[in-house]
Amino acid sequence: MRTESSAGPGPGAGPGAGPAPGRHFGGGTLPAREHLPAGRGGAPGTPLAPLLDVVIPVYNEERDLEPCVRRLHAHLARTFPYPFRITIADNASVDATPHVAARLAASVPEVRSARLEEKGRGRALRAVWSASDAPVLAYMDVDLSTDLNALLPLVAPLISGHSDLAIGSRLARSSRVVRGPRRELISRAYNLILRGSLAARFSDAQCGFKAIRREVARELLPMVTDTGWFFDTEMLVLAERAGLRIHEVPVDWVDDPDSTVHIVRTAVDDLRGVWRVGRALAVGALPLDRLARPFGDDPRDRALAGVPRGLTRQLVGFCVVGVLSTLFYLLLYSGFRTFCGAQAANALALLVSAFANTAANRRLTFGVRGRERALRHQAQGLVVFGIGLALTSGSLAALHTARADAPHSTEIAVLVAANLAATVLRFLLMRVWVFAERRVPTYPPTYPPTYPVTDLHPAAPAYPHQGRTTAPAPTSAPAPTHDHGHDPRTAR
């Protein structure tokens, strides 16, 4: 990525504007969310550094780019009470789009342009967001299909420190959407697929209206591999699985009839992405623990060594895994019983199901991801298996002592009762011993070189974490107006 043009040093060139070149917020967990200051400036007389950076990814938009950017800029200047920047991210356009973007950057102080030589919305967002010095990063589609009055509600939870990401939703009950039945059907079907396959709880993955806090983007973006339209979905799924807070804003949305998105090809690519992300999550291949947040910003919470995972959720997960494991065990026992004695069949069935039970509880009940300590957990699970074997084998031995010719149905009933008795002990052992939460030491943050932030902001000095100089907050802001009234597409 390279910068095409900018007007002067720009609003982000003052002291405290951005991270040092080649650094990012890495290593360890994320800090507690804090309310961002109302003004971010340096010495008196220097421009305020932007609190919000709105990225507009474009490809061959020479006709619509200038009116849309000027409309967005006018709306922000009139209604947004914080310093802002608009960044045009050109995705290797082959028409006059780069020239239009350069002209806008030269004539409007809050507008910058960046040129990428490869296509891909996800690639453009990753490059610009990674290089930005603004603490809140957002993006919008160039057609401005979303009502601009939703922009401040979108970023307000991120500014206040309440949420990590925010998305616009066209599928919320209070949203008002104007689009054809084909796009409506595809959108709802896609979100149903996400809910069924990846257990996604957010309602609208592909609305081109999203925002993220910068420290979250620094840790999350390296885990997102897609560079196209699936970028949004992958980012949201990983954030949700990591326990980050996603805020949804109902939006008014008018479909762009001139959209150049290839729906069928995009849908196929998205389904491939769903499969890839689902497989990565299933095997624990992503270090989502790097995205963990402290419990809250209350000093009393920060003094705690750690907040244990919810007992209720663990019990539910353990019960579900236990029921499935018991059914699996009984099927194995019945199969082994056809060619060996009761004690041998019980031991073999328990041994096989023990490995599956430990792996399922490790991932689903106690949320342990990755391969670290996996062999140790399986070894400890075998000890728990030994206890279960002793209980069930003892129950079978007692049954056969009392009645040597006990029928198979009676054996099954005794084994079910013995397994239920062992379940409580098994859960306690797994919670306090096998998968006991370890205290994670707090290390000072490290900054391995990751992103070439000098491409977009070559003069930005190091961004201090503490003692940031702030300017007084604006005393008032003009009342917002409904921008869709100026959109000719809504005139009927």
Image (cartoon, rainbow, N blue to C red):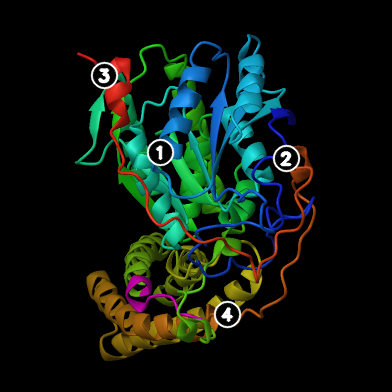
Tell me residue 492's x, y (percent): 19, 13
Q: Look at mark 4 in the image and give the residue it sits on.
A: 380
Regarding mark 4 in the picture, which secondary structure is present there?
helix
Q: Which residue is drawn at 80% across and 53% down?
A: 449
Q: What element carries label 1?
A: helix
Residue 124: image x %, image y %?
A: 62, 32
Would you say residue 119 is visible in this rendering? no
Judge the density around disc 4: few (<14), some (14-19), many (≥20) Cα neighbours within 10 Å: some
SS of the residue at dot 2?
loop
- Residue 78's mark? 1
Mark 1 belongs to which amino acid?
A: Arg
Q: Which segment did they paint magenta?
A: 306-314
What separation in Å lies between label 4 and label 2 (alpha carbons)?
60 Å
From the image, state whether disc 1 or disc 4 is nearer to you: 1
Most extreme residue toward the front is: 45
Q: State which mark lies toward you, 4 or 3.
A: 3
Which numbered disc covers residue 9? 2
Query: Closer to the N terminus: mark 1 or mark 3?
Result: 1
Which residue bears the numbered disc 3?
490
| Residue at the image position 36 percent from the left and 32 percent from the top | 190
Q: Tell me the kind of residue under disc 2.
A: Pro
Q: Where is residue 486 in the image (x, y as percent from the top left)?
A: 31, 22
Q: In this view, does 464 lie to the left or right of 181?
A: right
Using the numbered discs, state the Cα–Cα distance from disc 2 to disc 1 in whole angstroms.
23 Å
Foreground disc of the pair 4, 2: 2
Query: Compared to 305, does 96 lie above or below?
Result: above
Q: Nearer the viewer, mark 1 or mark 3?
A: 1
Please tell me whether residue 313 belongs to the stretch shown in magenta: yes
